[in-house]
Image (spheres, rainbow, N blue to C red):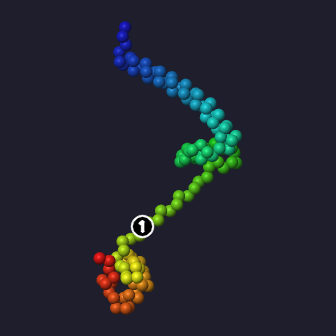
Amino acid sequence: MAKTLAQLNAQIAELQKKVDAVKAKEAVGVIARIKEAIAHYGLTAADLGLSGPAAKAVKAIGAPGQVVARKTRKKAVKKPGGVIRYRDEAGHAWTGHGKRPGWFLAALESGKTAQDLEVK
């Protein structure tokens, strides 16, 4: 007698449950052996090529009192400067934001206007 598609799918689902149960049972022993080896050899997350959440997991299973992984700070990203609105003949530049620079004030005192110094 030929089995129907529904019967075959049910059989596959039942076998998959058995596979998952055996895999979970074996994983317990594997995890225990890995933890033991990490603690014995003092391995770090970097030694294992791990980063992110996996690195935190390795730190958690290190030997008691032993720091396995270290946190590092990310370097600050420098913000790009603004658009230059004013420039003089000497090459000084200013975006027009913030306190007026000395070269700009000196140019105004010498008779130039802000429009004369604008970048076109």
Q: Residue at x 64, y 38 (%)?
A: 35
Tell me if 31 is positioned left or right of 82 in this view: right
Q: Is residue 2 above or below residue 46?
A: above
The quadrant of the image that shows the N terminus is top left
Q: Which image quadrant for residue 2?
A: top left
Q: Write down the quadrant of residue 22 in the picture.
A: top right
The residue positioned 65% from the left and 44% from the top of the image is 43
Residue 89: x percent and y percent?
Answer: 37, 82
**Residue drawn 51% across and 27% down?**
20
Locate the C terminus by quadrant.
bottom left
Badge 1: residue crowd in 10 Å (few <14, some 14–19, many ≥20): few
Instruction: Report the front residue among 1 and 104.
Output: 104
Asked whether the viewer can see residue 84, the reply is yes
Residue type beneath disc 1:
Pro
Residue lying farthest top? 1
Residue 112 quadrant: bottom left
Q: Secondary structure at mark 1?
A: loop
Above or below, 37 relative to 51 = above
Residue position for label 1: 80
Rendered residue at 35%/79% (across/down)? 86
Percent position of residue 54, x then y: 55, 44
* Residue 52, percent from left and from top: 53, 48
Residue 60 seen: no
Q: Residue 47, how many percent across, how many down?
A: 61, 45
Closer to the camera in the image, 25 or 76: 76
**In the depicted structure, whether residue 67 falls above or below residue 93:** above
